[in-house]
Amino acid sequence: MENMIALEQIVNKLPGVKGAKILADDGGTLKEIHILADVKKPAKQLVRDIETAIYAASGVKIDRKIVSVAQISDDESDSTATETYEEAIADETARFSLLTLETKSSNKRLTVNVIIDDDGKQLSGSSVVDVNDDEKYMAAVEATVAAIRESIPSFRVEFIERLKYGLSDVILVVCSAIMSGERRKEAGARLFKKDSLNDIVLVILETLNKM
């Protein structure tokens, strides 16, 4: 664990990197590296920088495929961008979109219901949490995953975390699904407005639409 923290601190010092999360298995082998960065440097270059920094610090040569980079613009407060090794799908071809998100509170419980459009087909999902839960936004994650699984049973949110980006909060997410016989992962990021569950659903859908 201490080694992971040390590596995260090193990666966080790289130019353009705003946040890093490194995950390893029980034997200490690096399995996933999730990066939040600005858009000043191409994602492929960032991955090469991260590979070099980790090798120099630990002697471990990583597989670049375990690195997911989500990029967010400094210039436009509501603008985000993500890059991986393949070009992102254009917005106009997006398959999934949010139709409605509803919340209901009763008996100290919060219910989140989402309806998602999948090329004309409506998908729905819901989740219930305690009203006072500090991470009640996870109900939006669970409801969204439940809805998407009506269409893509293999869909997962592998990783989601709130990070500080200047004075703002950012949601960094990694999603996966089986595509063409293999599990594929994509990373995404979005500015998170205070208590805006919509942003949770939207960052998941934006990431899914690139897969």
Image (cartoon, helix red, strand yellow):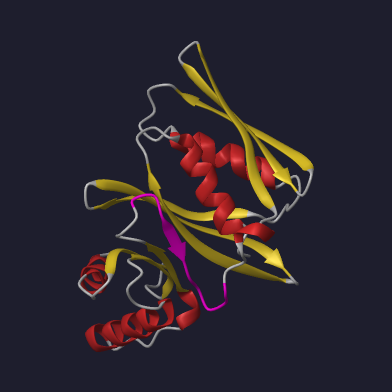
- Of 183 and 100, the residue lying toward us: 100
Q: Residue at x 60, y 54 (%)?
A: 156
Q: Residue at x 47, y 65 (%)?
A: 82
Residue 4 appears in the figure: no
Residue 95 spot, x, y in % from top left: 70, 54
- Magenta residues span 77-87
Residue 208 spot, x, y in % from top left: 61, 57
Residue 61 appears in the figure: yes
Question: Residue 207 magenta-drawn?
Answer: no
- Of 121 and 178, the residue lying toward us: 121
Question: Dividing the image into 4 quarters, which one contains the N terminus?
Answer: bottom left
Give the left or right position of residue 32, taking residue 85 as reference.
Answer: left
Give the left or right position of residue 155, taking residue 51 as reference.
Answer: right
Residue 85 spot, x, y in % from top left: 53, 78
Question: Residue 79 magenta-drawn?
Answer: yes
Most extreme residue toward the top, as rendered? Answer: 107
Q: Residue at x 30, y 87 (%)?
A: 52
Q: Quadrant of residue 127?
A: top right
- Of 21 and 118, the residue lying toward us: 118
Give the left or right position of residue 50, taking residue 156 as reference.
Answer: left
Residue 154 spot, x, y in % from top left: 69, 56
Give the left or right position of residue 44, taking residue 97 as reference.
Answer: left
